[in-house]
Image (cartoon, rainbow, N blue to C red):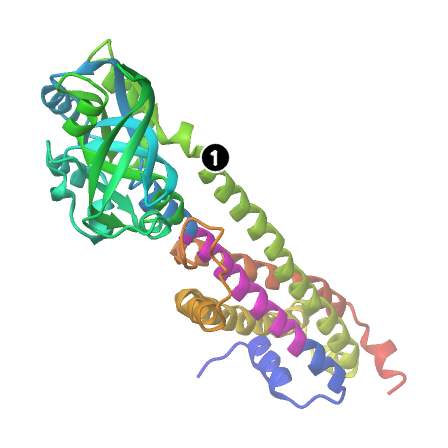
C-alpha cells in the first residue's frame, strides 16, 4: 500500500518510545488542553443556544411577538384579523386581546397581575399557554362565567386551588353612594399553567368579553396579536398591518424583550472568544513540544538529510507530528463536548435536585437548556484544525534548516 514518506516517518516518530519522557509529557498535555478547550467551547455555546431557544419558545410563545392596537375598541376584529393574515404571508396566526392591570386578593394575600382577555380558540394558535397547562384548559374561559387562569407559582404563593374564588381589583375608582371605591370583580380559578417563573408570577388569563365588561368597554378587542413564522419578521409585519387601518399602532418583541436577546447574543460571543483562548493556549503548547522534539531528533534529521531528504520532506515529517496531536485532541474534544452538551441538562438537574442547590431560581426557566448547532461544531473543529496546522509551521521550518555537518560533528 502506498504511503507518503513524510507520513510514514512522522507516524514512526509518534509511535516510537522517546528517550526524553518530558517531551512525551508536554505532547500529552498539549493534546489534553486541546481536547478540553474544544469540549468546553462546544458545551458552553450549546448552553447559550439553549437559552436563546427557550427565550424564543417560552417568553415569546406567551407574550406578543408582534401586535397592533388602537385607542378605540376594535369591534370588527374578526374581519381585521383575516385582512392582516391575507396581507402578509410572514404571519402564521392572529388573535384578539384586551389587556388590563390590577391586583388579585385571596385569603389575605395580595399580588399584582397582568391580565389578558383572550378568545380561547384564537389564543391557542398564537400562544404556548395551552400546551403548558397544569390544570384546566383555555376552553374553560367562557364569556359571562368570569373564570380566570393563573400561573402555578402565583396560585401556590397565594394558597389557591382550582375552584377557589379570587378578587381582581382594578386601579380605577368608581363613584358610589358610599363614596369612591375601587372597581373589583370576583373570579373563579379554573386552571393553572407553568411556563417560566417570570411569566407564572405576573400573568393571568380571562375571557376577552369578561375583561371588556370589567373595563366597561363595548364588545370588541383592544388589539390583535400576531404570531410569525420567523420572529425576526415581526417589526415589518406589524408595521405592514398598520397600513390596513389608520387607527392601528404597531408593537413587537424587539421593544419589549429585545434586550434579552441582545444580552444572550453578546454573552455567547464573549464567552466563545474567551474560551477560544483556551484552545489557542493549548495549540501554542504544540509549538513547545515540537521545538523540543526537533532538538531531540537533530541527529536523525541530519542523517535523513545525508541520505537525500529535502528540507520540504523534513518540514512535512514534523508537521505530521504536530497535526497528529491536533487531530487526536480535536476529535476527542468534539466527542466529549457533544456528549456533555447532550447530557448536561439531565446531569445538572440531578445534581441540583439531589443537593437542593436551587441553581436556577434566578432564571426564567428551572433547568439548564442545551442545543447543539452543527454550524457551531463545524466552526470550532475547523478553527482547531487550522490552529494546530499553523502551530506546526515554525518548528518544522526550524527542523528543515538543520545543517547535517554541524550536527553530526559532535555525534
Q: Residue furthest top?
A: 246
Q: Nearer the viewer, residue 146 or 24?
A: 146
Residue picked out by circle 1: 259
What segment is highlighted magenta in the picture? 28-50
Q: Is residue 336 or residue 351 the one in the foreground? A: 351
Tell me: 97 left or right of 371.
Answer: left
- Specify the quadrant that holds the N terminus: bottom left
**In the picture provided, is 240 more to the left or to the right than 302?**
left
Quarter holding the C terminus is bottom right
User: What's the residue at 77%, 67% (across, down)?
Assistant: 401
Q: Position of residue 337 (x, y in %)?
A: 48, 67
**Number of numbered labels in the structure image:** 1
Does residue 240 lie above or below 233 as drawn? above
Give yes or no for residue 44 being in the magenta stretch.
yes
Give the percent coordinates (x, y) of residue 309.
68, 75
User: Measured along the vertical axis of the image, is residue 126 above or below residue 364?
Assistant: above
Q: Is residue 287 magenta?
A: no
Main SS class of the magenta portion in the image: helix
Residue 52 at x, y percent in the picture:
41, 47
Quadrant hosting residue 115:
top left
Q: Which residue is at a point 45% across and 39% down the rendered structure image? A: 261
Amino acid at each position: 500500500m502506498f504511503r507518503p514518506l513524510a507520513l510514514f516517518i512522522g507516524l514512526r516518530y509518534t509511535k516510537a518510545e522517546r528517550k526524553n519522557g518530558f517531551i512525551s509529557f508536554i505532547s500529552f498535555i498539549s493534546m489534553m488542553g486541546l481536547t478540553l478547550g474544544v469540549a468546553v467551547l462546544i458545551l458552553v455555546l450549546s448552553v447559550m443556544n439553549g437559552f436563546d431557544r427557550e427565550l424564543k419558545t417560552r417568553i415569546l410563545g406567551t407574550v406578543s411577538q408582534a401586535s397592533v392596537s388602537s385607542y378605540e375598541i376594535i369591534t370588527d376584529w374578526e374581519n381585521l384579523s383575516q385582512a392582516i393574515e391575507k396581507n402578509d404571508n410572514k404571519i402564521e396566526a392572529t388573535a384578539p386581546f384586551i389587556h388590563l392591570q390590577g391586583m388579585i386578593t385571596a385569603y389575605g394575600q395580595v399580588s399584582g397581575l397582568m391580565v389578558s382577555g383572550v378568545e380561547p380558540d384564537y389564543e391557542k394558535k398564537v400562544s404556548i399557554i395551552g400546551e403548558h397547562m397544569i390544570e384546566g384548559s383555555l376552553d374553560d374561559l367562557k364569556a359571562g362565567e368570569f373564570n380566570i387562569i393563573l400561573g402555578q407559582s402565583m396560585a401556590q404563593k397565594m394558597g389557591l386551588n382550582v375552584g377557589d374564588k379570587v378578587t381582581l381589583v382594578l386601579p380605577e375608582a368608581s363613584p358610589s353612594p358610599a363614596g369612591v371605591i375601587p372597581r373589583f370583580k370576583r373570579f373563579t380559578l379554573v386552571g393553572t399553567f407553568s411556563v417560566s417563573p417570570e411569566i407564572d408570577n405576573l400573568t393571568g388569563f380571562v375571557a376577552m368579553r369578561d375583561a371588556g365588561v370589567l373595563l366597561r368597554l363595548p364588545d370588541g378587542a383592544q388589539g390583535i396579536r400576531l404570531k410569525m413564522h420567523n420572529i425576526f419578521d415581526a417589526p415589518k409585519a406589524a408595521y405592514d398591518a398598520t397600513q390596513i387601518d389608520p387607527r392601528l399602532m404597531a408593537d413587537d418583541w424587539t421593544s419589549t424583550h429585545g434586550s434579552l436577546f441582545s444580552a444572550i447574543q453578546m454573552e455567547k460571543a464573549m464567552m466563545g472568544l474567551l474560551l477560544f483562548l483556551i484552545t489557542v493556549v493549548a495549540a501554542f503548547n504544540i509549538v513547545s513540544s515540537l521545538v523540543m522534539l526537533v532538538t531531540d531528533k537533530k541527529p536523525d534529521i541530519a542523517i535523513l538529510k545525508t541520505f537525500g531528504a529535502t528540507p520540504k520532506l523534513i518540514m512535512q515529517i514534523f508537521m505530521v507530528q504536530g497535526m497528529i496531536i491536533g487531530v487526536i485532541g480535536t476529535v476527542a474534544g468534539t466527542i466529549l463536548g457533544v456528549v456533555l452538551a447532550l447530557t448536561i441538562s439531565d446531569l445538572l438537574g440531578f445534581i441540583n435536585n439531589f443537593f437542593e442547590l436551587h441553581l436556577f431560581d434566578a432564571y426564567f426557566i428551572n433547568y439548564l437548556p442545551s442545543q447543539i448547532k452543527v454550524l457551531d461544531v463545524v466552526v470550532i473543529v475547523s478553527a482547531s484544525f487550522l490552529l494546530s496546522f499553523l502551530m506546526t509551521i515554525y518548528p518544522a521550518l526550524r527542523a528543515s534548516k538543520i545543517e547535517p555537518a554541524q550536527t553530526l560533528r559532535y555525534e
